[in-house]
C-alpha cells in the first residue's frame, strides 16, 4: 500500500461531512405537501358532514313539531268530544268520568281532567267554542288543554286536562328520534319538559320550531347528540387510496432518509474521531503505513516528544525520538507492529524528547481500516507511564515494608477466605503463624472455635494443643480478589497469664498476712474479750464446787449458775469462730451476699476494740438494698481495716462515733461509706495515701489501704477518700450488685472468659 493512497483516503475523510447537504430540504417539502393535501381533504369532509347534520336537524325538528302538534290536536279533539258529552242530557257526569278515564289510558301524559266554572285565560284569543292550550302557573311546569262545555247553546263551564310536558314529549316520539336528539319544550329561557336529563353543550347543534296548538312563545327545541360522523363511501375510498399512497411514499422516503442518515452518521463519526484524536487525546497517536513511514501525528504526540508535527510526518525508521542506544530493540518492536504480532496489552518502551531527556512509555498498535475493511496502515498509541511506574514502585515498596512488618511481628496473623466448593483456605499467614500452626488454616479455625465471646469482640483463648494462652482479635474484611475473608491476630499471652497468676497468689498471701497483722494489732483486745467469759466460767465452776463440798448444792441452786456458764462459753465461742473465719486461707470466690451480713460481721470484730476505747459504731443500711456480688471475707477485711483506721484517727476526737452507711448508687452498683470524726488527712498526704509501704503511723507497714484498693478493684469497684466539712474523713467504695452479674450471664450473651 503506497503513501499516496493513504493521503487520498485522509483527504476524503476531511471532505466527508460536506457531502449531500443540498438535497436535505427535498424530503421535507414532499412530506409537507402530502400533509397539507390530506389535511385539506379531511377539512372538506368535516365541513360537508357538519352541513348535512345541520340540514337534518332542521328537517327533523320541523317534522317533530308537526308530529307533536298533531298529538296535542288529537288530545284537544278528544277533550272537545268529552265536553259535548258533558253538556247534553242526563248522566252527563258519569259519562264524563268514563271518557276521562279512557282518555288518560290512551294518553299517559294526561295527569287529570276536571270541570271548572272559569277557564284559565288564554295567551291569545281562541276560536269560539274551540279547545285551546295554556301554560298553568306553578312550581312544576304543566300544560292545560281547555275545551268549553256547551249546554243548550250556551257555555256552561270548561273541561281542563292537565298535561305533563315531559311525558308528552316521551310519548309523542319514537325511540329512534329521542336517541338522536334531545327534545325539549322551552318558553324563553325556561325548560317546561325534556326527553333527556342532560344539558346540551355550547358546541351542540340546536334548532327550535313553533308547535301548533301551543301558546305563542312555547317552542320545540332539538339538540343533536354527539355521534360518529359517517363519511361518504366515495370519500372513504378516496381517503383509503390517499393513505396507501402516502404510506408508500413515506416508506420510500424513510428508507432513503435512513440510508442517508447512516451515511452521514458514519462520516460524522469518522470526522469526529479524527478531531478527538487530534485535539483532545492525552495519548500520543501516530499513523504509519506498511513500510513504517509516519503519515500522521496528533498534537499530544508532538507535545510528548517536543518535535513539530511537520518534522515528524514523513520520517522513516529510525525515528528522531528513538534513543540512539536502543535503536535495535525499537526496530524489533516496530517489526512486530507491522507484522501484527504486538500483544494487545502493549509493550513498554523508552522515548527521547527533543531536549535529550527520556521517559517511559507504553506502546499499543491497532490496524487502520477503511470503509471496505481494507487495512490502510497502523495506528500507534504512546502513553506516558512515568507516573504510573512511580506509583507502582511506591506501592511495591510499601507492600514490601508492610510484609516485613507483618513477618517480624510476634503475633500470629492469618487470613482465611471461603472456597467456591465449600470450606475455607488460608490466603495469608505471617512467619509467627507458620511457625506455630503450620501452612494451613487449622490453627486459625481452632483458635476461633475456642473463642467464647462474640467473634467481633475477640478475647482470651487457651489452645490445648500448644498449651498457650492467646489474646485473639478477629474481624471480617474484603480480600484482594473480592471475597469476604476474616483477619485474625493471635498474640501469645502465656507469660502474662503466668505473671498474673503469680501476682494473684502474691496478693492472696498479702491479704492473708494483712488479716493476721490486723488481728495481731488487736491481740490484747481480743485476749481481754476472751478473758472475760473464761474468768466468769471459772468463777461459776468454783462456786458450784464450793457448794458441792459444803453440801449446799441443789439442782435448783445449780441451774442458774450452769446457764450463765453456758452463755459465757457461747460468747467465747463466737469470738473464736469470728477470728477463725477471718484468718482462714481461701481462694477468692464471688457470690451473692447481703450488705447487712458483711457489715455485721466486720462491725462485730471491730466493736471489741471500739468498746475498749469508748467509740460507738452506727450502722445505716438502705432498706431493700439488693444482694452484692462479692467475696464476703475480702470485703469484711476491707471494712475492718477502714474501721480500725477510723478508730486510730479518733484517738483524741471529742465526737466518739463512727458511721457505716450502705446505699444503692445506680442500676448496677452499691456504695459503702465509713465516716469518722478524727483529725482528718492532710492534703499533701492524699496523693500518696494508696501507695505501697506509705504510712502516717510510726508502726504502720503502709500496705493496708493499698490492699483494700486492690480488693475493691478486683470487685470492679472504686475506693475514694474525701474530707468532711466539719471534721474527719469519709472512705467510700463501690461494689457490684448480684443482679447486674445475673444479667451479664443471661443466655442471650455468652459468658466472658475471666
Image: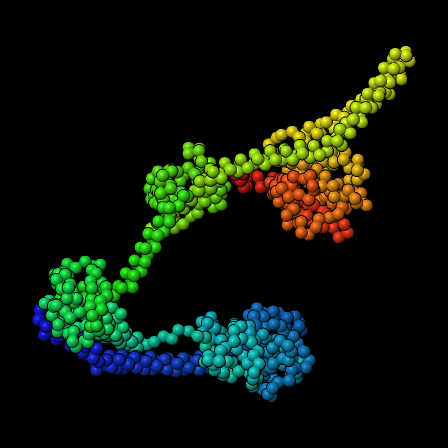
Horizontal and vertical percent for residue 11?
A: 15, 77
Q: Name the residue: 39% across, 45% down.
A: 409
User: Quarter-wise, where is residue 440 in the image?
Assistant: top left
| Residue 734 is at least partly visible in this image | no
Q: Locate residue 446, reporting x and y percent.
A: 42, 37
Which residue appears farthest toward the left when viewing the image?
Answer: 2
Q: Nearer the viewer, residue 519 or 664?
A: 519
Total numbered labels:
0
Where in the figure is residue 56, as x and y percent of width and height? 41, 80
Quadrant of the frame with the C terminus: top right
- Looking at the image, is 460 positioned above or below residue 319? above
**129 or 465: nearer the viewer:** 465
202 versus 391 height, above or below = below
- Residue 65 vertical placement versus 704 (above, below): below
Left or right relative to 55: residue 314: left
Looking at this view, name the residue that lies furthest to the front. 698
Above or below, 286 relative to 507 = below
Choose between 336 and 119: the one closer to the eye.
336
Amino acid at each position: 500500500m503506497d503513501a499516496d493512497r493513504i493521503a487520498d483516503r485522509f483527504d476524503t475523510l476531511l471532505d466527508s461531512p460536506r457531502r449531500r447537504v443540498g438535497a436535505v430540504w427535498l424530503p421535507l417539502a414532499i412530506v409537507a405537501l402530502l400533509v397539507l393535501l390530506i389535511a385539506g381533504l379531511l377539512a372538506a369532509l368535516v365541513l360537508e358532514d357538519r352541513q348535512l347534520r345541520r340540514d337534518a336537524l332542521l328537517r327533523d325538528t320541523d317534522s317533530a313539531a308537526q308530529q307533536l302538534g298533531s298529538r296535542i290536536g288529537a288530545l284537544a279533539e278528544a277533550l272537545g268530544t268529552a265536553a259535548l258529552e258533558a253538556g247534553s242530557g242526563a248522566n252527563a257526569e258519569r259519562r264524563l268520568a268514563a271518557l276521562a278515564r279512557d282518555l288518560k289510558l290512551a294518553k299517559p301524559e294526561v295527569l287529570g281532567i276536571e270541570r271548572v266554572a272559569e277557564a284559565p285565560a288564554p295567551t291569545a284569543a281562541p276560536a269560539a267554542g274551540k279547545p285551546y292550550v295554556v301554560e298553568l302557573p306553578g312550581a312544576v311546569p304543566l300544560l292545560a288543554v281547555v275545551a268549553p262545555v256547551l249546554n243548550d247553546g250556551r257555555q256552561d263551564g270548561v273541561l281542563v286536562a292537565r298535561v305533563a310536558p315531559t311525558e308528552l314529549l316521551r310519548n309523542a316520539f319514537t325511540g329512534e328520534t329521542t336517541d338522536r336528539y334531545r327534545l325539549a319544550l322551552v318558553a324563553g329561557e325556561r325548560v317546561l319538559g325534556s326527553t333527556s336529563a342532560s344539558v346540551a353543550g355550547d358546541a351542540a347543534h340546536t334548532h327550535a320550531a313553533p308547535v301548533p296548538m301551543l301558546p305563542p312563545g312555547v317552542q320545540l327545541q332539538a339538540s343533536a347528540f354527539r355521534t360518529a360522523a359517517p363519511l361518504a363511501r366515495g370519500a372513504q375510498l378516496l381517503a383509503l387510496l390517499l393513505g396507501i399512497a402516502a404510506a408508500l411514499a413515506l416508506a420510500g422516503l424513510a428508507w432513503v432518509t435512513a440510508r442517508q442518515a447512516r451515511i452521514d452518521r458514519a462520516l460524522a463519526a469518522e470526522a469526529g474521531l479524527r478531531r478527538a484524536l487530534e485535539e483532545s487525546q492525552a495519548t500520543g497517536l501516530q499513523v504509519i503505513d506498511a513500510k513504517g513511514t509516519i503519515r500522521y501525528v496528533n498534537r499530544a504526540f508532538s507535545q510528548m516528544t517536543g518535535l513539530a508535527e511537520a518534522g515528524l510526518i514523513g520520517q522513516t525508521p529510525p525515528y528522531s525520538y528513538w534513543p540512539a542506544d536502543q535503536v535495535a530493540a525499537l526496530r524489533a518492536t516496530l517489526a512486530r507492529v507491522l507484522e501484527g504480532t504486538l500483544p494487545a496489552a502493549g509493550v513498554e518502551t523508552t522515548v527521547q524528547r527533543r531536549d535529550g531527556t527520556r521517559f517511559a512509555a507504553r506502546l499499543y498498535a491497532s490496524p487502520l481500516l477503511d470503509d471496505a475493511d481494507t487495512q490502510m496502515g497502523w495506528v500507534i498509541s504512546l502513553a506516558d507511564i512515568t507516573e504510573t511506574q512511580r506509583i507502582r514502585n511506591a506501592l511495591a515498596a510499601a507492600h514490601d515494608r508492610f510484609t516485613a512488618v507483618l513477618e517480624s511481628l510476634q503475633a500470629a496473623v492469618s487470613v482465611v477466605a471461603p472456597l467456591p466448593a465449600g470450606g475455607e483456605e488460608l490466603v495469608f499467614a505471617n512467619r509467627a503463624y507458620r511457625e506455630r500452626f503450620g501452612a494451613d488454616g487449622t490453627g486459625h479455625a481452632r483458635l476461633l472455635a475456642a473463642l467464647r465471646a462474640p467473634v467481633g469482640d475477640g478475647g482470651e483463648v487457651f489452645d490445648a494443643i500448644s498449651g498457650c494462652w492467646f489474646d485473639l482479635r478477629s474481624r471480617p474484611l474484603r480480600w484482594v480478589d473480592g471475597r469476604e475473608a476474616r483477619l485474625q491476630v493471635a498474640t501469645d499471652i502465656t507469660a502474662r497469664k503466668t505473671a498474673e497468676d503469680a501476682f494473684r497468689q502474691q496478693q492472696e498471701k498479702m491479704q492473708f498476712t494483712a488479716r493476721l497483722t490486723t488481728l495481731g494489732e488487736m491481740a490484747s483486745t481480743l485476749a481481754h474479750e476472751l478473758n472475760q467469759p473464761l474468768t466468769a466460767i471459772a468463777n461459776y465452776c468454783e462456786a458450784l464446787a464450793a457448794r458441792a463440798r459444803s453440801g449446799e448444792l441443789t439442782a435448783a441452786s445449780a441451774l442458774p449458775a450452769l446457764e450463765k456458764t453456758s452463755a459465757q462459753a457461747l460468747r467465747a465461742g463466737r469470738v473464736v469462730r469470728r477470728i477463725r473465719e477471718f484468718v482462714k486461707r481461701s481462694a477468692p470466690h464471688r457470690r451473692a451476699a447481703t450488705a447487712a451480713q458483711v457489715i455485721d460481721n466486720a462491725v462485730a470484730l471491730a466493736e471489741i476494740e471500739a468498746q475498749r476505747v469508748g467509740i460507738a459504731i452506727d450502722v445505716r443500711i438502705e432498706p431493700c438494698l439488693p444482694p452484692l456480688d462479692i467475696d464476703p471475707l475480702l470485703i469484711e477485711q476491707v471494712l475492718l481495716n477502714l474501721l480500725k483506721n477510723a478508730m486510730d484517727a479518733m484517738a483524741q476526737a471529742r465526737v466518739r462515733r463512727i458511721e457505716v452507711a450502705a446505699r444503692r448508687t445506680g442500676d448496677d452498683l452499691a456504695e459503702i461509706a465509713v465516716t469518722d470524726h478524727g483529725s482528718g488527712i492532710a492534703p499533701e498526704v492524699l496523693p500518696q495515701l494508696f501507695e505501697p509501704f506509705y504510712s502516717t503511723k510510726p508502726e504502720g507497714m503502709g500496705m493496708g489501704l493499698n490492699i483494700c484498693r486492690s480488693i475493691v478493684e478486683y470487685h470492679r469497684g472504686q475506693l475514694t477518700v474525701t474530707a468532711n466539712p466539719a471534721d474527719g474523713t469519709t472512705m467510700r467504695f463501690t461494689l457490684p450488685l448480684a443482679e447486674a452479674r445475673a444479667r451479664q450471664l443471661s443466655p442471650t450473651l455468652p459468658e466472658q472468659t475471666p
